Amino acid sequence: MEYTYTLPHGYIDLDGSSHKQVVLRALGGYEEELLTSSQQVSAKQVSRVLARCIVKLGDVVSVSESIARNLLIVDRLFLLLKLRLITFGDFIQSVVHCPESDCNQKIDIDFNISDIQFADINNPREIYQLQLSENSVLQCEIDDPRVDFRLPNGGDQELVSSRLNNNSAEVVSFLLSRCIKKFAGQDGISLDQVKTLPALTRLEIERAIEERAGDTDLSMTTQCPHCQFAFEVPFDIHDFFFGELKISQQHLYNEVHYLAFHYHWSEQEIMSMTKEKRGNYVAMLSEEIERLNDALA
């Protein structure tokens, strides 16, 4: 079964055309296995899975890993949420601890993925422009106030993943060096140059990127039923989604063994099925075995 959605930003091809409509299929056994093949899921694995599960992207009928890698972070996050929805269902249950030091009680958090809204990025483009403020230009001692930049994508995520142990300022500097395409009339900017930018200039560029990139920090407001303390709960789709897959990995292999043993299907045939389809066959087979056992009793 295939599902159609509209991306917040969309893929911009080499001709500058925007492709926002995406057709997805649910994760199959191979994708589930791929995402659980290592202790920590990498951005590269996400690119591979998106390339396999995107059936069509606008007019693009063959989505390569390169295209998946070039999707913006907000679009990749959107796609992961939709893959979670069509693979595991809409409903999510989680447990958090109240951050109030005198409470620290466990709180059940329930919500639906379909309730999470992404703002549509109007007039999406490959390169955006920013005019630095007069004070920023004076501090930089430059003549050209224009900054051309692109938005962070999956390729940036793949490269940043090797730098995640560094401090956040180092990661942001690295991203800026990749996303700034023109500064002070010159093409591109080096990492060392980014590190020497005045704080005001960095702030203006970072805010411009954040405003146009869309919201990638998912959170919800909740209230502790024990102490009535209200607080924000961050929702990390990577940790949650891949945590679910880790838990279900052994279940996947059990399903493959069960179906192969009784139906004599090959591993390839079973692993190509979605979780829902495997589950339906397992349920029917279990009912049939139970019926036969009752008849023999």
Image: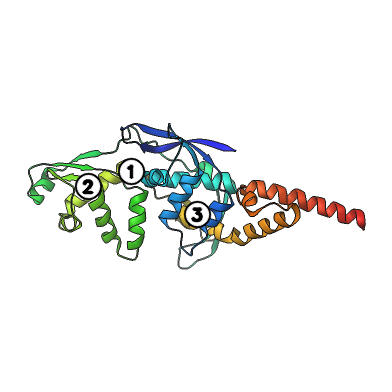
CA gap, disc 1 and disc 2: 14 Å
> Quadrant of the rendered structure where residue 147 is?
top left
Q: Report the residue at 42% width, 47% height from top.
A: 65
Between 207 and 36, which is closer to the camera in this rendering?
Answer: 36
Decide: marks 2, 3 in contact (CB < 8 A)? Answer: no
Q: Amino acid at mark 1?
A: Ala
Mark 2 or 3, nearer chain start: 2
Residue 225 visible in this rendered orientation of the protein: no
Instruction: Reply above or below: 224 against 91.
Output: below
Q: Residue 202, percent across and down?
A: 20, 52
Mark 1 or 3, nearer chain start: 1
Between 196 and 113, which is closer to the camera in this rendering?
Answer: 196
Q: Residue 8, percent across and down?
A: 40, 38
- Dot 3: few (<14), some (14–19), or many (≥20) neighbours within 10 Å? some
Name the residue beneath numbered marker 1: 213
| Mark 2 residue element | strand
Label disc, if present, on residue 223 of the rendered structure? 3
The image's colour scheme reads rainbow
- Dot 1: few (<14), some (14–19), or many (≥20) neighbours within 10 Å? many
Q: Which of the image's four quarters has the N terminus?
A: top right
Label disc, if present, on residue 180 of the rendered structure? 2
